Image (tube, rainbow, N blue to C red):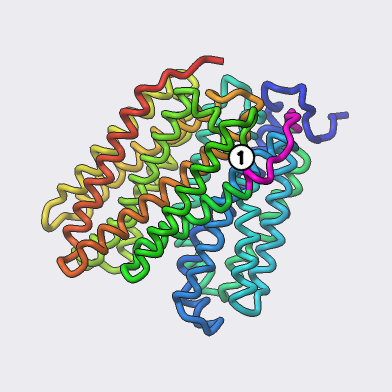
Amino acid sequence: MAAPLGPTPPKAHDGLPPRERVLAMAAISLAMTMAVLDGAIVNVALPVMAKDLAVPPSAAIFVVNGYQIAVTAALLPFASLGDILGYRRVYLSGLAVFVAASLACALSPNLSVLIAARIAQGLGAAGIMSVNIALVRFVYPNRMIGRGVGNVALVVAMASAAGPTVAAAILSVASWPWLFLVNLPVGLVALLVASRTLPVTPRSRARFDLPSALLNAVTFGLLIIGIDGLGEEAGRGVALAEIAGALAVGTVLVLYQLRLPVPLLPVDLLRIPAFALSMATSIASFGSQMIAYLALPFYLQDVLHLSETRTGFLMTPWPIAIALMAPISGRLSDRFPPGILGGIGLAVMAAGLTGLALLPAEPTTFDIVWRLTVCGFGFGMFQSPNNRVILTSAPRERSGGASGMQSTARLTGQSLGAAWVAVLFGLTHGTGAERAIAFSLWSAVALAVFGGVASVLRRQPEG
């Protein structure tokens, strides 16, 4: 009789057996797909939600911002809890909260309840995102970690690409609450499989640091709110004050962390050159990608006068190319230096962005598509090797902190990129969109080049 499936004990450090590995990755993939999708699909439904709940669009935006702030502020505290309690426990708890909050979102009678439910959903998503890469380190054997990281990158890319399409498809046949109700069957299946297959990981003897968690939440909460406010000229002074407050509280946080043997904000990991350079590379690359993602639709619609549908179609090659390249580069990173692979990938991405910045006045569809495809292939070549370095350059017992920092770097880069585009469009208001788009794309090129240089400078310790 075959042994029943169940959590693998902590002694199994070098990955799970093949069958359990496949099931564990299926559970991780389902949960990550939901978390990433719900960060994007609601944007499409905001106008419908605002009308149905009888609130102005400016108020409905908090449905998105509440989720984003909760995710960003909770990532590192939950990663720390993962080191203390075990990554499996934090992941399952986050998934359970996410599913329950999805039901609460669907049943929300008014905006206040919906925002509260979205904040709870963001906390659940943070539980999932904070330790997903750390779990990969225990699901896959050491020789296959790059492959596991590449599979996670593939899931994130596909979910990001599918977000607007999934939202449009659901809204074409059902009301907006179904955007959240679809999470229930998927989430329950993921919970069932994850509870039976995710490995039990070693726990640290550290205690959870509540003051650090509160300082972290204030720092990232103020930072995200301030960055979001930079796009509105009338409120830019308040936004700058919020960012200044975030920097002040963040300074206190860092100084406090330097005194701790196992800090919640893993500043000790930043003393590892490969880890620190990987963080810089990640922030720069995701900032570059977000700048292009936001600026290009304005180019396609305001300059070339294309429809929203065609704009969405033309933007699709980028995430598709990432999805195709991410698992390949993950496998390559198990055999070749990840820093070099990441540097090559960001050089390719910079070349594609340069091509977009130099598009002819009347480009053909092919002119646009091949450049976007080059950008996607470059980003896909970078992402998996970079995540592999982040994970393996940290000590095994600090995998949770490394995983939390990886997700925090991604969200920070995306937020900074979005803010930069908003500022550029605000400064060039009234002079035409072309200047803001050009500045944005060349800024994206510069960030990609910076990230590529940081990548090739890494020297990752083996083992």
Q: Which residue of the protein is positioned furthest toward the left in this rendering? A: 361
Task: Please say if 346 is above or below 433.
Answer: above
Q: Where is residue 401 in the image (x, y as percent from the top left)?
A: 60, 35
Q: Quarter holding the N terminus?
A: top right
Q: Quarter holding the C terminus?
A: top right
Q: In this view, does 346 lie to the left or right of 69?
A: left
The range drawn in magenta is 200-213
Residue drawn at x 32%, y 60% is 422
Closer to the camera in the image, 186 or 457? 457
Query: Does the segment drawn in magenta span residue 63?
Result: no
Q: Where is residue 189 in the image (x, y as percent from the top left)?
A: 72, 52
Q: Give the amino acid at mark 1.
A: Asn
Closer to the camera in the image, 362 or 50? 50
Q: Which residue of the protein is positioned furthest toward the top in this rendering? A: 462
Q: Which residue of the protein is positioned furthest toward the right in this rendering? A: 1
Q: Position of residue 105 (x, y in %)?
A: 64, 69
Q: In this view, does 458 lie to the left or right of 366?
A: right
Closer to the camera in the image, 21 or 131? 131
Query: Does the segment drawn in magenta span residue 208?
Result: yes
Residue drawn at x 61%, y 34% is 263
Instruction: Determine the image quadrant of residue 98.
Output: bottom right
Q: Main secondary structure of the magenta part?
A: loop
Residue drawn at x 26%, y 62% is 425
What secondary structure is found at the residue carrying circle 1?
A: helix
Q: Where is residue 64 in the image (x, y as percent from the top left)?
A: 51, 64
Q: Look at the image and tell me whether residue 181 can be seen.
A: yes
Q: Name the residue under label 1.
A: 132
Q: Look at the image and tell me whether residue 328 can be seen.
A: no
